[in-house]
């Protein structure tokens, strides 16, 4: 990922509504959600939602597909992964403490959810 794409993705993520969208859509996988369902879930008017969805899609973090009269949005896992990888590899140079903090968070989340690996 080049620097300008990484900056666009990080800029798109630097908004609480957009982070809420990523949190909402990530567990739904490729199926995603219809725009109307997203608006209802977040209690957001359609024009405002459209603005945020567009920003995330242009940054390569969301995908959209039309089905009949609906537009479905889903997280682009490759876009999210490339963005995180850029920060870890290019910015943090695979610093061991940064990587350990990332692994620690994942293990802490697994422990909290009762899915910790032994």
Image (cartoon, rainbow, N blue to C red):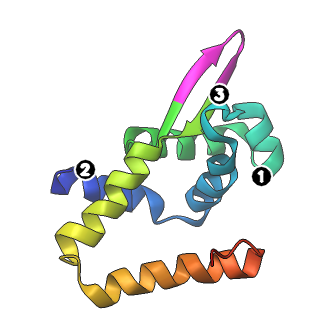
User: Label 2: few (<14), some or many (≥20) within 10 Å?
Assistant: some
First in sequence: mark 1 vs mark 3: 1
Secondary structure of residue under mark 3: strand
| Image coords of residue 33 (percent x, y) | 71, 35
Vertical placement of 8 versus 110: above or below? above
User: Is 65 displayed left or right of 78 in the figure?
Assistant: right
Q: Could you tell me which residue is drawn at 72 percent across and 12 percent down?
A: 69
- As measured in the structure, the alpha-carbon distance from the residue carrying label 2 to the one carrying label 3 is 24 Å
Q: Main secondary structure of the magenta part?
A: strand
User: Which residue is at a point 56% across and 56% down the rendered structure image?
Assistant: 18
Dividing the image into 4 quarters, which one contains the C terminus? bottom right
Q: Name the residue under label 2.
A: 5
Q: Give the residue at mark 3.
A: 72
Which residue in the structure is indicated by mark 1? 42
* Highlighted magenta segment, given as a residue range: 64-71
Q: Nearer the viewer, residue 69 or 117?
A: 117
> Is 95 left, or right, of 76 in this rendering?
left
Return the disc, 2 or 3, that comes first in the chain's sequence: 2
Q: Nearer the viewer, residue 45 or 109?
A: 109
Looking at the image, the residue that sits furthest to the front is 118
The residue closer to the viewer here, 68 or 51, is 68
Q: What element carries label 1?
A: helix
Numbered-mark total: 3
Q: In this view, does 56 lie to the left or right of 35?
A: left
> Looking at the picture, how far across and down is residue 2, in whole percent?
16, 51
Residue with the most extreme bottom position: 97
Magenta-drawn stretch contains 111: no
């Amino acid at each position: 990922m080049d620097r300008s794409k990484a900056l666009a993705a990080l800029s798109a993520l630097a908004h609480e509504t957009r982070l809420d969208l990523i949190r909402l859509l990530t567990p739904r996988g490729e199926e995603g959600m219809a725009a109307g369902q997203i608006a209802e879930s977040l209690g957001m008017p359609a024009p405002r939602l459209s603005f945020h969805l567009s920003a995330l899609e242009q940054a390569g973090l969301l995908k959209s597909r039309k089905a009949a009269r609906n537009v479905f949005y889903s997280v682009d896992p490759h876009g999210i992964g490339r963005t995180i990888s850029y920060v870890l590899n290019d910015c943090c140079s695979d610093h061991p403490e940064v990587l350990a903090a990332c692994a620690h968070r994942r293990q802490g989340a697994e422990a909290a959810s009762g899915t910790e690996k032994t």
